[in-house]
Amino acid sequence: TLLADMPELGKVSAKVAAALLGVAPYARQSGASDRNGRCSGGRKHLRDIAYMAVLSAIKVKDPVLGSFYQRLRARGKPFKLAMIATVRKLITILNAIARSDPAFNP
């Protein structure tokens, strides 16, 4: 479903892929006001699918995503921040596979 609903995968940069999914933080500035980056927008149903995939990867202790998540949590990052960062890592990996693997044909 993720690959079918996101045909841009492999044709765009990792930043753009994360933004399309809605897991790329962007700063909100206005005059002297400067707020922290927040992740929003993007394709919610795809973000939900990726979130559940990451949750499963963490539960089964996936060597790549699970260890990345555990490193973030060990550094004291909150659950939600670590999850969204791991979702972004997943979409970056999928984008790289779609871009570099000649056998990949969605």
Image: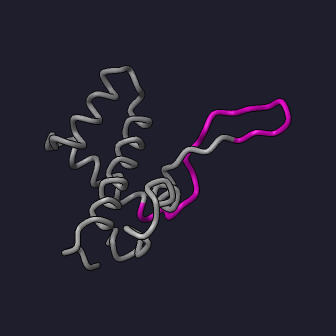
At x 38%, y 20%, the residue is 76
Q: Who's the residue at 40% across and 48% down the image?
A: 88
Q: Quadrant of the N terminus?
A: bottom left
Q: Is residue 1 above or below residue 29?
A: below
Magenta span includes 37: yes
Q: How many marks?
A: 0
Q: Is residue 102 left or right of residue 52?
A: left
Does 51 lie within the magenta span? no
Image coordinates of residue 2 in percent, x first then y, are: 34, 68
* Placement of 47 over or under 86, stated as above or below: below
Question: In x, y percent, where is residue 66?
Answer: 22, 39
Query: Which residue is depicted at the point 42% across and 58% down?
Result: 47
Q: Residue at 46%, 65% (x, y): give it.
A: 12
22 shown above or below 104: above
Indicate the quadrant containing the C terminus: top left, top right, bottom left or bottom right.
Answer: bottom left
Q: Is residue 93 above or below residue 61?
A: below
| Colour pattern of the rendering | one colour
Q: Position of residue 27 (x, y in %)?
A: 66, 40
Viewer-closest of 92 and 46: 92
User: Which one is in front, 49 or 4?
Assistant: 4
Q: Which residues are magenta?
A: 28-46
Q: Tell me if 25 is positioned left or right of 46 in this view.
A: right
Quadrant assignment, res 101? bottom left
Residue 37 located left or right of residue 24 = right
- State left or right for residue 4 relative to residue 101: right
User: How far across and how far down the image is residue 73, in percent?
Assistant: 33, 26
